[in-house]
Amino acid sequence: MTGAERHLAARVLSALLREDYGGLASRMTRDKDGVRLVLASGRAVRLAPGLLYQDFVSAPEEGLTLGEVLGTLAEVAGPQDSGGVAAFGEECRAALRGHEWLDARRDEVLTRLALLWNGAGASGGDMASAADPGTRGGVDAGGGAGSRDGAGSGDGERSIVYESLAAFAEHPVYPASRARLGLAEMDTVAFAPEFAPAFRLRWARVPRERVTGAGDPPGAWPHHPPRSDPSGAWPSEPLDAWPSGPSDGWPSGASDGWPSGASDGWPSDPAYVLFPVHPLTVPVVSGIPGVTVLDRPYLTARPTLSMRTVQVGPRTHLKLPLPISTLGARNRRSIKPGTLGDGARAELLLREVLRREPDLDVVLADEQTYAHAGHEYLGWMARRLPAGEIVPVAALLAPSPLTGVPSPELAVLSPVVDHAHARPSVPRVLDHVAARHAGGDVAGLLAGYLRLLFAWNVRLLVTYGIALEAHQQNLALVFTEPGTPPRLLVKDNDGILASPDRLRAAGLAVPGFTDPRVLTDDPHALADVFVTITLHLAAAAVAFGAGYGELVADALEKALAEHRGHPMARLLRARTLDAARLVGKSMVTAGTLADRGRVAADVNKHYGTSGPNYLRHHHRRKASQ
């Protein structure tokens, strides 16, 4: 049994216990020697006091096997969940394989990232060659002559290094986050962000009459600001409004952008539109009637932490559908037809909020350019990012090879989230960023981030009735001028939850979202998103993982004090600082295990678990000092 298996088995058992799947907690016994859990094999394993989010976890010395844990899962599951239990077993085995594949290549990947960080390869082709000199399946991972590499220099290269490092760390809650269901080793290494690969995109000819979208395709014509309705609505427009003339590059001028008829060898037909296609999605798109996948790859891409979103320019990402699942079998990485438009509408709503709240140092990614052809695997969105060095919040706890991390420390990475305030012995991206931008003051950098995070999200919720699913993957710190505090970058807003009544009361029009699930006037539903996303994932996982958990309650207290007396602020305080327990999401249950009939309409908003209030612990201790 490997260390990776012991680590994964312990995380899986702890997650099942946290969600009390199948009444697992009823198997716990207590005596003078402590708390134990009886497994299906009859073995009683010791439980340790919970870290964040739950009361008890598997004790580290127990040496669990994955087979023991999955056997116990099968015994407590009901017959209606048999399919989900089998799927989760495969997900866990895929996660274990993912750990092993990364462990076997970590030194190679770290070398590649160091080269990228140091600016190795002044040209895109050289950088791609450093990333992966091979070729597979018609995807030229090396760029080379004739390729159009969107990866630029400077901050753009550093940004993609941070994205890959973020993929080294595991999800704070979901135990099998290393799994990418549907991918073999070769494809995982070629396209997953933790391996820092480079590859070229494929392209499909799509009948123009099927396509709706907004904005100008990057590089298809000189960029014009996207049109928007002052009310916040974003129309779905036919692409007849899009020019089809020669390319003059991305708005930044750093890439040749969209292929066009003016590009040598590319077909030009006004009846068709070219869609970028991820190489992994080619088999699916090739089977769509009336759509032709072209043989010629074009435009070098590098995966971000999201994997389905790739960097194609220093300030440009493309979000593309993938035929895989992550964080649960039900979490398909396809793109539903209405999602892109709803994300654009949400962004315009948030931009109006920021126009009214100029003191908030928050910047939104531009996600107004997208297209869809009515199929979940035929769509794309272009994301334009602001200037500066962009550090994803998800990367902060990842080990940093930029500060001399010994490679054995990268074999197994899990969140360090306890109440002991133990500072990590391995340098992390957070330490590296603090040294570069905050004079080495890690606590000060974290405190500033938490102030920004809570000021933004509390004001959104209290004043406007908006809660964002902006977890650590969708947030970043943007550093521009030396010595100045970072801004908070927010992206991927299609998971918004908003109250129509509160928006109208604030004088804002209710956007015409196509997904009715994003609108609710239930204040507790809004608070659930705040607690499980903003508090648990964006704040606590980072601060406690860095050993500075005491900063969280203080930052939240300050943000709530700004709205003292407001009914929503009182509710939020009752649900956070003053609560006996904090709500959590049952991610494994909803994402894979449970029969669909027992899961919330939105699997990402399936609650039903709770854990100890880590805020009360620190808040009360501070008050007594």
Image: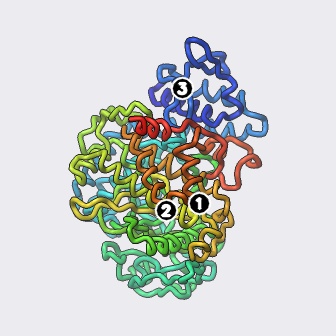
| Residue extending furthest toward the top | 32
| Disc 1 residue crowd, few under 14, some 14–19, many 20+, Cα 10 Å | some
Q: Amino acid at mark 3?
A: Ser
The answer to whether residue 615 shows anywhere in this view is yes
Q: Residue 459 got which mark?
A: 2
Q: Residue 556 placed where, x, y %?
A: 45, 50
SS for dot 3: strand
What percent of the width, then of the height, locates residue 16? 62, 34
CB contact under 8 Å: marks 3 and 2: no
Quarter occupied by residue 311:
bottom left
User: Mark 1 to mark 3: distance in Å?
Assistant: 35 Å
Residue bearing mark 3: 58
Which tag is nearer the camera, tag 2 or tag 1? 2
Structural distance between the alpha carbons of marks 2 and 1? 32 Å
Q: Work out whether 139 lies above or below 217.
A: above
The residue that mark 1 highlights is: 334
Q: Is residue 551 left or right of residue 332?
A: left
Tag 2 near tag 1, CB within 8 Å: no
User: Residue visible at 33% across and 64% down?
Assistant: 151
Which comes sooner in the sequence, label 3 or label 2?
3
The amino acid sitting under disc 2 is: Arg
Whichever of labels 2 and 1 marks the residue nearer the N terminus, that label is 1
Position of residue 622 relative to residue 524, above or below, is above
